[in-house]
Image (cartoon, rainbow, N blue to C red):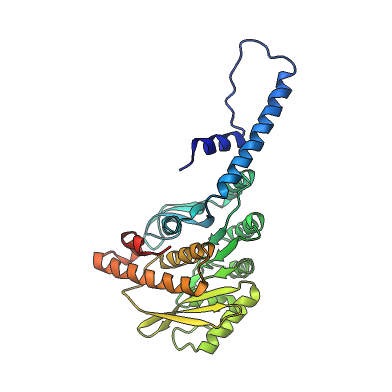
Amino acid sequence: MCTAEQREAARLLAGDFVRLRSARAKPANEGARGTRMRTAEQREARKEIKMSQLKQKKIAAINDLTGFGRCALTVSLPVISHMKIQCCPVPTSILSNHVGYPEYFFDDYTDRLAEYLSMWKKLDLKFDGIMSGFLGSGAQIGIVEDFIRSFRGKDTIVVVDPVMGDHGKIAGTYTEEMCLKMRSLISLADIITPNLTEACKLTDTPYKEEGWKEAELWTIARRLAEAGPGKIVITGISQGQYLANYVFEEGREPLIFRNRRVGKECCGSGDLFSAIIAADAVNGVSFAESVKKAAVFIKKCMEKSLEMGIEDKNGVCFEEILHLLKV
């Protein structure tokens, strides 16, 4: 919760001053003196905001905001907050419910993002982490690239979840041009979390549902690393009754973590996974440990969803057991 001093500082910085009208005419030099006072107040306001930034870590989360269905920002925000990091959402679009339902309200926010983010620039915000999820157009991918270049500090960790498709199929909304733009975006990332379909698309590797050898997965991860990111986890690798995650990190031996399948796949599990990865990275948790923790937690969420009879479309039930997620 903001303190009264922080609220006042933000108000002053925005220039939203309450001007009291005087019945008498002001002296000629009062305007100049008032301007100097306001300038000094704004400097103090900026100092106050910068000091407050040092007190808590922050992640800018770029994704859509979906009211029902537990995905995107609806998942990222509570999970990142639970992990003791301030989550600052950048909504790329607003949906009543996700598109897996027959009908939904949709409001594209692309044309408003520049104005939205310009306020953050005025506030001179800095972030410990930046993460992006589903992006609905080439224009949005370009906006995210500009955002990373503008707000990235020397210690900012950038996590990109290159959401494009699953099970060997690329989403119908994704054109070849957008896929190429996504390759450009991952070059700015420190960590990427593609599923197997997305990893294959980003590296022009033929997709297959089963039968992946470690050497093949290493080749895909190596190609992705050559594009820029030093840490890569390829998720959703089918191995019979198990789902595996392939963990690649520059300078370390690759690892594979497997968990037994639980129920059917649910929407939002990838958003939950990438939120944990991003928060852990900002908190200094090792990459391998973070991947293992995220996979185990999602498995527990799936088990809880089955126990409570929650339909697949409504996503994984993480709220009931969020307290089990270690920070």
Residue 225 vertical position relative to residue 318 in the rendered view, above or below: below
Q: Nearer the viewer, residue 15 or 182?
A: 15
At 49% from the left edge and 69% from the top edge, which residue is drawn? Answer: 171
Q: Nearer the viewer, residue 158 or 174?
A: 158
Where is the N terminus found, in terms of image quarters? top left
Q: Residue furthest top?
A: 24
Image location (x, y in percent) of residue 71 = 41, 60
At 53% from the left edge and 36% from the top edge, which residue is drawn? Answer: 5
Q: Nearer the viewer, residue 228 or 53?
A: 53
Residue 45 vertical position relative to residue 125 in the rendered view, above or below: above
Quadrant position of residue 324: bottom left
- Is 72 displayed left or right of 101 in the figure? right
Where is the C terminus found, in terms of image quarters? bottom left
Image location (x, y in percent) of residue 228 = 64, 72
Image location (x, y in percent) of residue 182 = 59, 68
At 62% from the left edge and 33% from the top edge, which residue is drawn? Answer: 15
Image location (x, y in percent) of residue 272 = 43, 64
User: Can residue 30 be seen by looking at this rendering?
Assistant: yes
Q: Nearer the viewer, residue 325 or 75?
A: 325
Quadrant position of residue 81: bottom left
User: Can residue 314 be seen by looking at this rendering?
Assistant: no
- Is 34 displayed left or right of 56 in the figure? right
Numbered marks: total: 0
Residue 280 vertical position relative to residue 151 in the rendered view, above or below: below
